[in-house]
Image (cartoon, rainbow, N blue to C red):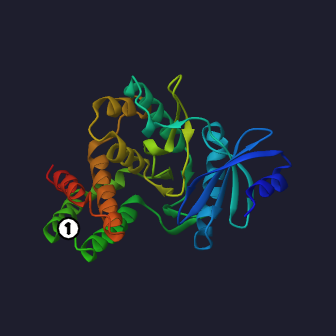
Amino acid sequence: MDVRQLVRDATGLEVGEVVERTGGQLSSVYEVNTSADPLIVKVYAPDWRWKQSKEVHVYGLLAHALHQAIPNVVHVADGITILTKLDGVPLSELDPPDWRAVYAQLGALLKRIHTIEQPEYGYLTDRILDPLPDNAQYMRRQFTKKLDEFSQLGGDRSLGIKIAEHVDRHQQVFADNTAASLCHNDFHEGNILVDPQTWRVSGFIDVENAIAADPLIDVAKTIQYSVRGNRAKLDGLADGYGPTPTDRIDLYRLYHSLELWDWFSSIGETTHLDSIAKDMADLVAR
C-alpha cells in the first residue's frame, strides 16, 4: 500500500517521511509527516474492520467534550482511518517528579469522559451489543462469562468458587450505579500522552476497548493496571476524579484481574498468571 499517495489523495497535502509505528493482528499504524501537521494512518486487517468502525464511532462520541484531548478523525475509507497526531509521550515511558499532580490530571480527564451518557450497558462497537438495562444484570453476566472462561482455561477451581461466592455476597452494590456512561476501559499509562517539559497531560489514545458501563469500572481498571499500590498515584487520581466507594472499586478490580488472567491464559502467556491469581485471592479475602 502506498501510504504517501493515500494521504495525498485524502487530504491534498504534501507528504514527507512515513514511519511505521506498529504492526500487528489488528492494524498497521504509520506516522506521516505532511506540509501541515503530522498524521496517523491506521490500516486494518480485513478480519478487524469492525474495530475501525468502533474507533470512529467512539471518537465521534468524545469529539464534542474532549476534542483537544483525542486524535481527530480526518478521513475514513475501507479499512483505513487517518487521524491527527496527538502531541506527547506515553506516560509509561516517563518518570514525573510529581506523580500525584499528573494523576490528578488523569482523574479529571477520566471524569470528563464519564459525562458522556449511554442508554444501556454493554460492549461498544458502533452500537451497544447485547445491551442490558441495568448495571446489576450487566455485571452478573460479565462475571459469569469470565468465571466460565477461567474454569475452561484450567484456573484453580477453589479460587473460582471463592470468586463466585464473593461476588454473590457483594453484588448488591452493582445497583448503586443507575446510569451507564462511556468508559474508555483501557485508561492506563501506555495510552496517556504527556508533555515531558511541562508535565501536562495532553490527552489519550486507543479507544478500541470502550464499553457502556458504570464509570467506576473504568476507575478500577486504572487502579489495577497502573496505580498498583502507589499512594501518590492513588491520591492524585482521587484529587482529580473525586471520592469513590471502595466496595464497588474492589469488585471491579477483581473483575479486571479475572478478565486479564483469562486473556493471558487464552494466548498462552503464563508469566503473570500466578501473580494475577494472588491478586484475586487477596481481593476476595477482604
Q: Amino acid at mark 1?
A: Gly
Q: Position of residue 136 (x, y in %)?
A: 36, 61
Q: Is residue 109 left or right of residue 138?
A: right
Q: Secondary structure at mark 1?
A: helix
Q: Dividing the image into 4 quarters, which one contains the N terminus? A: bottom right
Residue pushed farthest right? Answer: 12
Q: Is residue 150 left or right of residue 75?
A: left
Other residues around mark 1 within 10 Å, as few (<14) / some (14–19) / many (≥20): many
Q: Foreground: 63 or 206?
A: 206
Picture mark count: 1
Quadrant position of residue 63: top right
Q: Is residue 24 left or right of residue 238?
A: right
Q: Foreground: 176 or 183?
A: 183
Q: Position of residue 33 (x, y in %)?
A: 72, 43
Q: Residue at x 82, y 52 (%)?
A: 8
**Vertical placement of residue 111 versus 159, above or below:** above
Q: Position of residue 259 (x, y in %)?
A: 34, 62
Q: Foreground: 109 or 140?
A: 109
Q: Residue at x 30, y 67 (%)?
A: 265
Q: Position of residue 43 (x, y in %)?
A: 65, 61
Residue pushed farthest bottom? Answer: 152
Residue indicated by mark 1 = 160
**Vertical placement of residue 151 versus 86, above or below:** below
